[in-house]
């Protein structure tokens, strides 16, 4: 055990002193956040400017219905046909023009014409002036009492009440749901990034040592088991340090941007527990399968399957958001390879509705699976440490996994 601690201390110090570790831990998050926020701001301003440019110009109207008698709350230019309207649109004198057909009362269809390509921002709602639809309502109900017209323009104000699992009124609102979703996504990404960043250090270290033939010298002083344990402990501590720094930087960013998330002590404790178990599970698998490669590229190819498996909860993100306590969410919570991200997402988005029994079961399953993965990976690790020049076949790997521990 003493030698394992020596290896752990060495791996930790070497890793945290690397320039790229410092950059990835401290500098890269700040740069990424800054660039991301800057690009979002520029993109948002550009889109808004384009939208406002279209909406603030006069609106061309061709009234084939003959019922547009009320004065609109925006500037209008009336045309008698499509040809002069198109010419005005080409000269950019108007932002768009609409044709109200003779059968408007029967169909409710209005044709809008723009001199621009469609985009995701205009797919659901055309860029017509604000209040255009209410103006149409006012014209349709021109002979009706003003109070009825006002109600027709705003017919529905929904006062929503949500019930919790006990059937009592919940304090949850639509804004609360958005905050919880942001919290869930933050912890989902945090767990994935920290677990696999730390695991990649393990994979890279073992592959480089094998490729440079340093492993033969190292094994003269420690056993494969001590080396594997030391690497897991040392690089796990480095990963924990990295996660702590990212969490603090994330909280500082949230406070600076006045973004409201639901951050509770229980959430952080669960995140820590799932990080430790997830790191040991994936780290041991990365070490075991990574040791089978003859160089870094082969090791990454062999271990890439675990990255894909860990990413699988991302593909059911919509299902997790819509039904965090549904059957699919619970199944993914009890599968050890997907439990850390799925369970954290479920708890962050619905802390009161997530049964603690589910959390306990997922942790127990993850813990047992971690022990099994450690034992199996240790066999692959010992067999692959001094393997050079040739990648083992599937039969050899299977034989090593089933071999009795020497």
Image: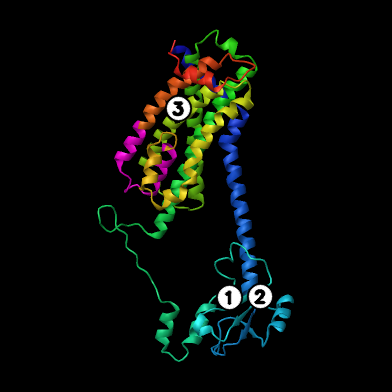
Q: CA distance from mark 3 to mark 1?
A: 57 Å
Q: Secondary structure at mark 3?
A: helix
Q: Which residue is mark 3?
A: 280
Q: Earlier in the sequence, mark 3 or mark 1?
A: 1
Q: Which residue is mark 2?
A: 95
Q: Which residue is mark 1?
A: 129
The reply to whether residue 214 is visible in this rendering is yes
Q: CA distance from mark 3 to mark 2?
A: 60 Å
Which stretch did the figure color magenta? 339-364
Q: Are marks 3 and 2 in contact (CB under 8 Å)?
A: no
Q: Position of residue 189 (x, y in %)?
A: 50, 42
Residue 363 colored in magenta in the image: yes
Residue 51 colored in magenta in the image: no
Q: Position of residue 196 (x, y in %)?
A: 52, 33
* Residue in view at x 45 percent, y 27 percent: 280
Viewer-proximal residue, 191 or 378?
378
């Amino acid at each position: 055990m003493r030698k394992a601690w020596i290896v752990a201390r060495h791996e930790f110090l070497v890793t945290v002193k690397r320039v790229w570790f410092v950059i990835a831990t401290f500098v890269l998050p700040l740069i990424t956040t800054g660039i991301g926020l800057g690009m979002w701001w520029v993109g948002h301003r550009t889109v808004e400017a384009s939208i406002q440019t279209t909406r603030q110009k006069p609106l061309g109207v061709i009234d084939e219905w003959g019922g547009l008698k009320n004065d609109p709350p925006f500037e209008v230019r009336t045309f008698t046909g499509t040809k002069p309207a198109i010419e005005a649109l080409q000269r950019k004198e108007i932002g768009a023009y609409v044709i109200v057909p003779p059968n408007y009362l029967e169909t409710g269809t209005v044709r809008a014409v723009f001199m621009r390509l469609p985009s995701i921002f205009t797919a659901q709602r055309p860029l017509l002036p604000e209040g255009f639809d209410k103006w149409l309502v006012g014209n349709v109900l021109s002979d009706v009492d003003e109070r009825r017209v006002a109600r027709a323009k705003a017919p529905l104000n929904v006062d929503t009440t949500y019930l919790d699992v006990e059937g009592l009124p919940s304090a949850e609102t639509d804004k609360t749901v958005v905050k919880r979703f942001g919290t869930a996504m933050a912890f989902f990404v945090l767990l994935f990034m920290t677990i696999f960043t730390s695991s990649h250090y393990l994979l890279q270290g073992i592959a480089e040592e094998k490729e440079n033939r340093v492993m033969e010298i190292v094994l003269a002083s420690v056993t494969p088991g001590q080396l594997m344990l030391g690497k897991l402990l040392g690089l796990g501590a480095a990963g924990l340090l990295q996660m702590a720094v990212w969490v603090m930087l994330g909280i500082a960013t949230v406070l600076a941007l006045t973004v409201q998330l639901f951050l509770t002590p229980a959430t952080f404790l669960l995140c820590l527990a799932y990080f430790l178990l997830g790191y040991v599970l994936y780290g041991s698998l990365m070490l075991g399968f990574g040791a089978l490669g003859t160089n870094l590229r082969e090791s990454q190819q062999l271990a890439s399957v675990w990255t894909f498996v860990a990413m699988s909860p991302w593909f059911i993100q919509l299902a997790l958001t819509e039904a965090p306590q549904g059957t699919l969410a619970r199944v993914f919570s009890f599968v050890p390879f997907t439990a850390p991200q799925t369970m954290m997402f479920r708890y962050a988005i619905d802390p009161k509705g997530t049964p603690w029994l589910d959390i306990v079961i997922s942790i127990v399953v993850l813990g047992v699976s971690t022990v099994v993965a450690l034992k199996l990976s240790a066999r692959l690790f010992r067999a692959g440490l001094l393997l050079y020049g040739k990648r083992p076949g599937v039969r050899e790997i299977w034989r090593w996994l089933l071999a009795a521990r020497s």
